[in-house]
Image (tube, coloured by chain):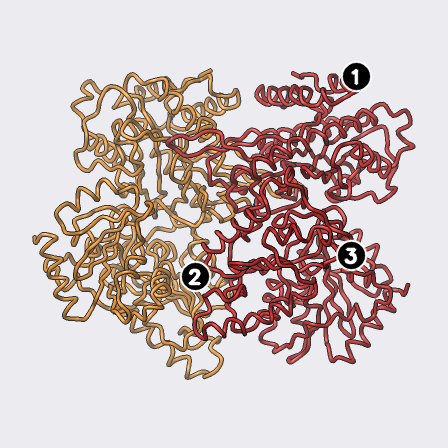
Chain colours: A red, B orange
Amino acid sequence: MKSSMEKLTALRALMKEKGIDAYLVHNGDAHASEYMAPYWKSRAWLSGFTGSSGLVVVTQVEAGLWTDGRYFIQAENQLEGTGIDLFKMEMPGVPTYIEFLTDKLCKGGKLGFDGRVVDVREYEKISATLKDKAVTFAYAEDLIGAIWPDRPGLPVAPAFEHEARFAGASAGDKLAAVREKMAKHDVSAYLITALDSVAWLMNIRGRDVSFTPVAYAYVLVTTDAAHVFIDHDKIASFAPNLEAQGFTIHGYDQLLGFLGQLKTSCDKKSQTDLNVNCDNLCCKLLYDPAKTSVAIAEAVPEGVQVVKDLEVDIVVMLKAVKSQIELENSRNAYLKEGVALVRLLKWLEEHTDIPSLTEGDVARKITSLREEQADFLEDGFSTIVAVGGNAAQAHYSPGPVGANLVKEGFLLIDSGAQYLDGTTDTTRTIPMGAITDEMKRDYTLVLKGHIALSRVVFPAGTTGVQLDALARLALWEYGLDFRHGTGHGIGYCLAVHEGPQGVSKRSQVALEPGMMLSNEPAFYVDGQYGVRTENILAVEKRCETEYGVFLGFETLTYCPIDTTAIDVFLLTPGEVEYLNAYHRKTYELLAPRLGEGERAWLSKATQPIG
Amino acid sequence: MKSSMEKLTALRALMKEKGIDAYLVHNGDAHASEYMAPYWKSRAWLSGFTGSSGLVVVTQVEAGLWTDGRYFIQAENQLEGTGIDLFKMEMPGVPTYIEFLTDKLCKGGKLGFDGRVVDVREYEKISATLKDKAVTFAYAEDLIGAIWPDRPGLPVAPAFEHEARFAGASAGDKLAAVREKMAKHDVSAYLITALDSVAWLMNIRGRDVSFTPVAYAYVLVTTDAAHVFIDHDKIASFAPNLEAQGFTIHGYDQLLGFLGQLKTSCDKKSQTDLNVNCDNLCCKLLYDPAKTSVAIAEAVPEGVQVVKDLEVDIVVMLKAVKSQIELENSRNAYLKEGVALVRLLKWLEEHTDIPSLTEGDVARKITSLREEQADFLEDGFSTIVAVGGNAAQAHYSPGPVGANLVKEGFLLIDSGAQYLDGTTDTTRTIPMGAITDEMKRDYTLVLKGHIALSRVVFPAGTTGVQLDALARLALWEYGLDFRHGTGHGIGYCLAVHEGPQGVSKRSQVALEPGMMLSNEPAFYVDGQYGVRTENILAVEKRCETEYGVFLGFETLTYCPIDTTAIDVFLLTPGEVEYLNAYHRKTYELLAPRLGEGERAWLSKATQPIG
């Protein structure tokens, strides 16, 4: 393979040929996915930097990579000798990539990029900032594709139906619910680009990317049709079922052409009023500008009215509120996960040669224990097993090997699974031997935050930003904090990170019964240790009074929380009671699924404290 | 005086004459003040409705008043027989007044209003909604003025200087700070319309309205001048001092004409680049669209670039962060207020004929006790003394008489004062005899919320919306809540409600050291009782760690919180400790300022509990 230097040279030659002054290499697929197929990893191929967030800008004289604080160290290492400079995002004095472009591009300059992987929101930001420079945009330029000889192909894995017993509602029922919302927002067509949204709506799952069981596809829902754009091979075995549910199937690469017809069709019906239903084709088109590419936006004829200011996308909202069947299945999936994790914790505790184990060994062990459980698909994300200071990087991943375990300090394990009946995400911090008083204190403060959020009762209409502080109060009192949100939404046999709900400074969406969220306060000491305790919660209705409907959280995750690392003196009686009740229930729910020795281990691990 | 019916007839005749199809009668002065001079009370004059929030829309066939939930009962009573219908804001099925206008106005219709009292933000909302109707706006039509023969004049009370020992910074220094921010926002002129902002900047106070010591005036700050628009009589005695600080004085009614010159002046310098400093006159003008009237906006020549998208107005932000001198003076003012309130509580407790007292008597008693204190100006708002169910109306005011006191249940007192050295606002709930277990529980839950907010430590950057839940958690657990914010900012010898900070669902401004806020969780049972406990807090820096700068609250208000109404079993040891420490300090700080008998009373009232 060529070096990054050689690739840059080839790219610059091509830029010159095409009169492109600056070229953007984004990290992303055509669906704004968190995890994507290798075909799309242009930025990693060009720069060698493999982090999940980052963008490269190339001019004839400079090349820079912009990434965030999670990846500064990794990027510094991976960029060495590439000819690409690191720009540390949000550090004082460091320009944003748009500021960099504003500075470097001359009036009338030309900015190129692959419009398939730049979303409309981002494009609007770029073009607004560069307006005064009269920059032209070459948005259909996949220059990396042109210089990448051994580029992997788009994935071709067959998709499969998510059976009714798992999916609950039929695709037809979901389509009806979507159309009801479309009518409310007065749109006649609605383009769904996010892969998990497509999978949810169609009741299909796929194998096109790692960690999220989705297939590359789009759906365009109109008032009386639902056009699916997907490689036919992927759904050949059950295409008639999809058609029976109301879907019309097109090739994956036919979307842009199809969108291009929209205006003609509207014109036929009416020249002036675009807000009518025209032969299943779009007249007033809704899409999510943060998930829809420039290539798509540019394929839509000018006469079509586009709605892109919905606060929350229709399917994103419908999908976030889990049905009774999805919740019931998730409860089962979480017990299966609990069994796998109890077996892991027992295995770890009883392992006679801890220093011989690597972080990667532990990660593989978790996966193998999950494989014993029914309806397991794959891990939900790259398992974090982090020894000591490694855990201070919130998004550490050990890779296949990683560090060796040690018989002291904390081991942090953050892992999740995709089962056909649910997606899990659990973090536990395990003392592997001696820990300091400070580590005990920090572990306990994080636990206090975790318990505070788990126990809160709140009125309907409350948003995550109003609850986020609860998980931090105990840390704040000691002048401590953690620099990420407390909780994210989670999918149902879909993405482990799912919107719109969350618990963080930025979570402005009201929590509704049926929404599922993580509860993962944490604390990190650079280079020394990390503490994080994470369960998944489901919002549930608690009571209704003249002061409103009140909600609370049902805990879905059952897995022992280490009690030996707790400084009991820092807990209130109510917190002790909560933890003991949690452990009582953990034993009750998991014991029937365990062997005798495992039950004995669990019984010990869930003994009451205080 | 004519009846509302007759006034409506006169108004409609005038509307017909002028071809106005619908006319708006707003409640407000030309400065968007909370309290205003009688001259501006057009809506109350027309409708008879005296609530602080409400707007009348009149057409030839209909007339409606829009007001919020606080005033539904009052408005129903006061509107009886007026020919004006009540529209209950935010109730299901009730249109907003803009929806009402959209429904009633025909295409090309004409909407009239007094543009002096409609702010730019509101006007933009109206005109955006009515755009499709091609409605024209007659914004210079004070039709109420034309039919109001005995309309009071604009106030003429002399203003006075806020002495250096109270004001701290000089007006000249404040001007310099303002100009620094203007430069940051790249504006060459800045119009200040809010009366408290004008008073803060000029270091003057006035007597033009009740409760807030301000004078009617505007200031236009440019890069090298500061034009004050005020009736010269009001400042005649100290005009030279103002001029020495850099102010140029114009008549109050000269503002619009002055603004009208801005374009000419800019044109002289440059036809194309408006962003330059032109002879002290505006080229790039900043104002707060929520505080600036349509009349002003329309007086600005078209060529002038207007900036109205600042998140927080410059002076509002500067004024919110109190200086060391302002904080030190406030501490003193709060102790004076504490003395007055202790005397009131003792007087009440020892009064031998409680049922002979009215709510109004108690309110007057508070004012008279304040008059014994140095540098007292006036009450800071209409004192709330509320017996039993009256307290369930959060904004109840007894008027001069009100209900008679009773020797049972709660008496709620919410009152505040304007001292030259600070503005106070305190609420206490006092058991006047037997109270039920439920009242005790609710009183204690409110107290728990009050303590939780008082004690919190939080990182710099935290906003009120992140802390609001702390004051509600205890109530939420019982399915209870209160329907107003937990805290508002407060002025310094200025408005009792002052932005931008607050503690509520809507408080998105980061709390900064020096900001002052109320802490007033509450609970109301309709028709039965109300509980509210309010102290004023100042944000202070607590510590700095590698995880950030951490802030907390200093309590400024010292006045005993009744302990006999507490259900001690609901308090945690930490809460008991907090309350006892608060009472210990209350005694320490107030005792030296009290007589012997008062000290004895205070000593009893501040005995530790638990």
Circle 2 sits in a helix, a strand or a loop, which is it?
helix
Q: Nearer the viewer, mark 3 or mark 2?
A: 3
Mark toward the start of the polypeptide (1 vs 3): 3
Q: Check residue B175 in the rendering and tell me which mark sits there, or answer none.
A: 2
- Report the residue marked by disc 3: A155
Which residue is more in the foreground, B218 or B524?
B524
Q: Position of residue A162 (x, y in %)?
A: 67, 44
Looking at numbered disc 3 in the image, what kind of residue is underneath it?
Pro
Secondary structure of the residue carrying numbered label 1: helix
Q: Are marks 1 and 2 on the same chain?
A: no
Instruction: Tell me the kind of residue under disc 1.
Output: Glu
Q: Residues within 10 Å of mark 1 (few under 14, many from 20)?
A: few
Q: Residue at x 79, y 51 (%)?
A: A73
| Residue A435 rendering spot, x and y as whole percentages | 78, 27
Pointer 1 indicates a residue of which chain? A
> Alpha-carbon neighbours of circle 2 within 10 Å: few (<14), some, or many (≥20)?
many
SS for dot 3: loop
Residue that badge 1 annotates: A596
